[in-house]
Image: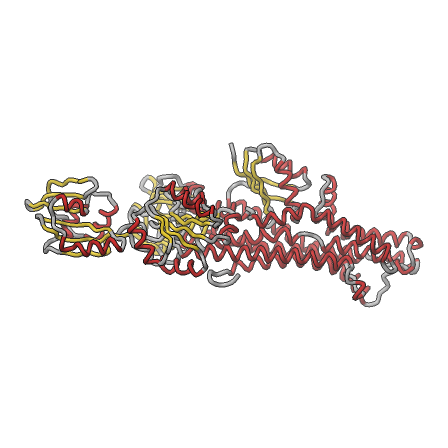
Amino acid sequence: MSQAVHLALLGVSCAGCVRSIEKALGTVEGVEKASVNLADRSAHIEGSAEPQAMIEAIQAAGYDARLLSGDDESDLDTQQAAENAHLKKLWWQSAAGLALGVPLMAWGLLGGEMMVTTPGSRLAWAAVALLCLAVMVLAGGHFYRGAAKALGHHQANMDSLIALGTGAAWLYSVAVLAFPALFPANARHLYFEAGVMIIGLINLGQALEVRARGKTSLALRRLLDLKPKTARVLRKGKEWDIPAAAVLLDDQIRVRPGETLAVDGKVLEGTGLVDESMLTGEPVPVAKAEGDKLHAGTLLQQGSLIFEATGVGKDTALARIIAQVKKAQGSKPPIGRLADNIAAVFVPAVMVVALVAALVWYNLGPAPAVSHMLVVATSVLIIACPCALGLATPISIMVGVGKAAEAGVLIRSGSALQKLCEVDTLVLDKTGTLTQGKPKVVDAKLLLEGEIKAWVKALEQGSEHPLAAALLDWAGSSAPAPITGFDTLAGHGVKAMLDGEPLLLGNQRLMAEQGIDLAAVETDSEALMAKGATPVYLAKGGQLAALFALADPLKPDSAAAVAALKKQGLRLVLLSGDRQQTVQALADELGIAEVIAEVLPEQKAEVIRRLQSQGRQVAMVGDGINDAPALAAADVGLAMGGGTDVAMEAADLTLMRGSLAVVEDAMALSRATIANIKQNLAGAFLYNSLGIPVAAGVLYPFTGWLLSPIIAGLAMALSSVTVVSNANRLRFFKPGGKA
């Protein structure tokens, strides 16, 4: 049976590590899909393989992993504790490297002798060599162990580059110290400070990166913090405060003002105002009364409620949102695979470049050739570490997906996030997307005197038809008239007797069959139908008593949202199964030029495919239920959600607020996130493409300047910090603004 497994990873430091672990997991029998997230050092695996087999495969590749429990809050706490411990270790490792490296570098910069000139200086430098070796082992041992493991598996990674660079600097210096006669006098320069400084700077860069990276999971932490610890359950006539995890289906729960709901449920008693912004992004509280749905994590602002638990544990809307966010944050968009593919060949290529540069400097460079060769090779190896490249995509995805969740947009995958910004055609469903999905009486023309509301109430109070509900809302609290002989006429309406006279309510066919003259409202009826409304007639005693216009009204923000989407240059198509006249009237009101009406659900998918065959990138917005085939067929499916009915399986994105305005926000956030990824990738590529040639010495013939390995280490460390900091700008993104 297929299952999802989450692992926390240890020893992962660059894009090469990600590639190695994914490759190792791919060899495990039963693994269907494996995705490693460098940003939070985790792996998401789907398939039937045993977790222990996955962990063993990762260990065989030179890394380590541990199984996460599946409890979101516990897992995040575990990862956070591990990150804090790792950060603490990086701080002291950095301090150790810099505490020795800075004085040594300062000694050289201030004119101190950095060469072996006398027997006394050899003894002093021998002590320095041993001290540097101790610091390199204590503060940088993880680099050398990682390099050794990678070598044992015929692989190379970031650790390989650091180990080669710093190791070469130390070994060269020891060789000069031990056998100075083998080197020309001007080549007896010592580079002990380079190894410890590089290790100190890289650890410092990683510490700053880990600290900045901690902010990227704030959105998930905020979602988890919405889960209350306890619930007040009514059992055997008493109230009990129990852990939220112990609440059972059908339990009755009391919630008071200022308390957060522990589980999903349905109101049994009371009224109140509930803040559902965590689900919908909508700050206005929602009135709740008997029969209304409630969702875990929402806050009761006013009133008091008793509700019945309908969803507990992993089955609450909040739990599914958290699961969706976690999965999406760990996924990769197509643009992210570019970095993975480059990383697969990048480190070996850098080693070749370093070797070639060393040979060129040794054979063609100025004296002292050996010293120049060492400086160039070390600088190339250090500056080329692909840390920034590996972080460029996942760090932005983590922040972007979390930011979207805060705005009420649930994104299923990084791929969907990227596709959304490429969309040029937006197909809109009508009912429940542009309209409220609930017919209302939008106009009433009363022609007879009498208790018309009481007559309507009497005729419709037993009906479950949507139009009946609209008429009952119009009738309000009126007492029903005392009718007799009630009868439903399928496809026509209803009839009964009142005071010995026939009472009729229904469509034009019913009135025609019963001989009711509609001439007085014929013009009005045609005008209503032209506007997309449905006319309903009421007659008493053979005379027309009233004309009602029923329509599914637009959502308050639909017109503004459509106008904003048109401004973005999107091609808008209104797709509906409703009558052509009704759909066309709505399209005319909103200014949508393309209308496709009277189509069945399966035909909607055909429309989507036809648009795609024209070379269009198509997004479909629907309610996620009867539009499921079209949502699945679209390049990006966006489902209008509402609490537990989020339709995650059919759509790539779920709009929890149920408003078309959120589509504009989602597209803006998609563009901002992909732009951020491109900035990160461009910065990482530019850094390496410029840094490697400079480190190789291409500027030396023109400027006489050669890059120091220490400066290379500082630049490499800062590149990762820059990428993480740039991704964190997305946390301040506001629709309509800039990230």
The single residue placed furthest to the bottom in the displayed view is 110
Residue 479: image x %, image y %? 15, 50
Q: Residue at x 79, y 56 (%)?
A: 376
- Quadrant of residue 586 in the image? bottom left
Q: Is residue 237 left or right of residue 635?
A: left
Residue 716: image x %, image y %? 69, 57
Instruction: Give the camera-side residue of 681 and 260.
Output: 681
Residue 156 can be seen, yes or no: yes
State how the image is colored: secondary structure
The single residue placed furthest to the left in the displayed view is 500
Q: Is residue 732 left or right of residue 450?
A: right
- Quadrant of residue 624 in the image? top left
Residue 718: image x %, image y %? 67, 59
Q: How many marks?
A: 0
Instruction: Give the camera-side residue of 361 and 107.
Output: 361
Q: Residue at x 54, y 51 (%)?
A: 398
Residue 141 can be seen, yes or no: no
Residue 359: image x %, image y %? 83, 52
Q: Residue at x 62, y 44 (%)?
A: 9
Q: Is residue 277 left or right of residue 439?
A: right
